[in-house]
C-alpha cells in the first residue's frame, strides 16, 4: 500500500489534530501531514510541497476555504488534488458553493471516523 | 420539524428548542470527544472558570455560550487534543472555543430554515469568572446543564426577539 501525504487547513489547532487522527483511524496510510491555519498559508505550503489530499475548513480568517479551493487550480502543485471540505457550515448553499468551486467532498462537523473514511477513501482509490 | 419562522412567531417558542439544543450538545460530545453525557441533579451549580461564545446573526440573532470550571474544560480539551493541556494554554482555549462552535453549528443545522439564513461568528473565549455579560435588549434565553465525566457545564442561547 502506498503512503499518502495530506494537507489539513483549519484555523483551529484542535480540529487539525482531530482530522489527522480521524484519517489515521480511517486507515489512511499517512506518510506526511502538512498543516495550515488558513487558505493563504495553505497556498504557501503548496509552493514547495506536493500532496495527495487536502482537507479544508470553510470559515477561516485571511483566506477562507472557498477562496482557497478556487485558487488551487491555478497552482502547479495544487492542480487536480482532491479537496474535502470540513466545516460546521452545513447550509445547502455553502455545500453547493464548495462543490462548484472544485471541492470533491464535504463533511459536516461533528463527524464520525466513518464519515471521514467514506469521503476520503474513494478519492484515494488510485493511490492506495 | 418546526421552522425557525414558526418558532420565532411565538413568544414561548424558544422553549421547544431546549431538546434540540440538548441533542446538538450530545452529538458533539459523542462524536468528537467520545463521551456520553449525563443529566445533572440539583446540586450541579458550578463556578465558571472559562466561557466560550459564538455569535449568531441573520434570521436568528443571539449568542451561544458554554461555561464550566477549568477542570472540566481541561478534560474536554484533552479528549480532543489527545494530551492534557495546561489550564491557561491557548490549546485549551482553542479546543473549548471549537466545542462551542460545533454545538452552535450543529444546533442551527437542526432547525429548518435556520441553517441557510443564520451565520456564526468565530468563537471568543473568556477565562475567569469576574466578568459580566450585558444582555441583549428584549431577549429570551434557553439553557441546558449537563454532566461531562460528572463535571457540570452549561450551554446557553440568548436570542434577540
Image: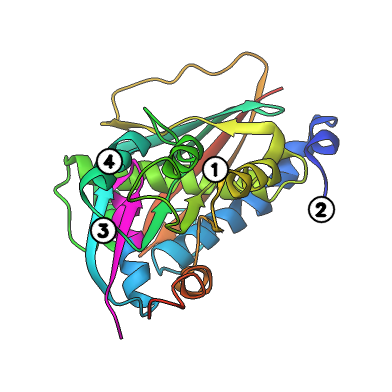
Residue at 41% over, 34% down: B123
The residue labelled by disc 3 is B81
The residue labelled by disc 2 is B1
Find the distance from the CA under tag 2 to the CA under tag 4. Answer: 34 Å
Find the distance from the CA under tag 3 to the CA under tag 1. Answer: 20 Å
Find the distance from the CA under tag 3 to the CA under tag 4. Answer: 12 Å
Which residues are the magenta region?
Answer: A1-19
Quadrant in the rendering for residue B127:
top left
Under tag 2, what secondary structure?
loop
Q: Quadrant of the C terminus of chain B?
A: top right
Q: Is residue A21 visible?
A: yes
- Label 4 crowd bin: few (<14), some (14–19), many (20+), radius 10 Å: many
Q: Is residue B69 visible?
A: no
The residue labelled by disc 4 is B93
For residue A76, side relative to residue B11 (left or right): left
Under tag 4, what secondary structure?
helix
Front one among B153 and A122: A122
User: Do the residues at discs 1 and 4 belong to one chain?
Assistant: yes
The residue labelled by disc 1 is B104
Q: Chain of mark 4?
A: B
User: Do the residues at discs 2 and 1 belong to one chain?
Assistant: yes
Amino acid at each position: 500500500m502506498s503512503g499518502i501525504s495530506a494537507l489539513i487547513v483549519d484555523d483551529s489547532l484542535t480540529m487539525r489534530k482531530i482530522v489527522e487522527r480521524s484519517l489515521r483511524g480511517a486507515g489512511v496510510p499517512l506518510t506526511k501531514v502538512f498543516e495550515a491555519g488558513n487558505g493563504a498559508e495553505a497556498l504557501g505550503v503548496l509552493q514547495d510541497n506536493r500532496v495527495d489530499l487536502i482537507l479544508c475548513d470553510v470559515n477561516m480568517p485571511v483566506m477562507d476555504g472557498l477562496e482557497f479551493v478556487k485558487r488551487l487550480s491555478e497552482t502547479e502543485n495544487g492542480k487536480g488534488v482532491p479537496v474535502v471540505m470540513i466545516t460546521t457550515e452545513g447550509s445547502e448553499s455553502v455545500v453547493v458553493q464548495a462543490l462548484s468551486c472544485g471541492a470533491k467532498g464535504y463533511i459536516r462537523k461533528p463527524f464520525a471516523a466513518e464519515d471521514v473514511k467514506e469521503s476520503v477513501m474513494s478519492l484515494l482509490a488510485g493511490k492506495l | 420539524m418546526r421552522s425557525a419562522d414558526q418558532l420565532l412567531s411565538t413568544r414561548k417558542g424558544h422553549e421547544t428548542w431546549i431538546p434540540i439544543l440538548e441533542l446538538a450538545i450530545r452529538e458533539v460530545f459523542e462524536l468528537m470527544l467520545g463521551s456520553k453525557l449525563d443529566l445533572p441533579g440539583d446540586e450541579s451549580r458550578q463556578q465558571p472558570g472559562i466561557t466560550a461564545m459564538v455569535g449568531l446573526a441573520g434570521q436568528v440573532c443571539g449568542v451561544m455560550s458554554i461555561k464550566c470550571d477549568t477542570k472540566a474544560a481541561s478534560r474536554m480539551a484533552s479528549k480532543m487534543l489527545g494530551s492534557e493541556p495546561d489550564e491557561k494554554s491557548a490549546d485549551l482555549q482553542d479546543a473549548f472555543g471549537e466545542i462551542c462552535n460545533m454545538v452552535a453549528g450543529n444546533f442551527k443545522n437542526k432547525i429548518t430554515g435556520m441553517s441557510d439564513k443564520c451565520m456564526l461568528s468565530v468563537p471568543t473565549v473568556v477565562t475567569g469568572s469576574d466578568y459580566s455579560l450585558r444582555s441583549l435588549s428584549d431577549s429570551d434565553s434557553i439553557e441546558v446543564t449537563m454532566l461531562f465525566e460528572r463535571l457540570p457545564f452549561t450551554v446557553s442561547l440568548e436570542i434577540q426577539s
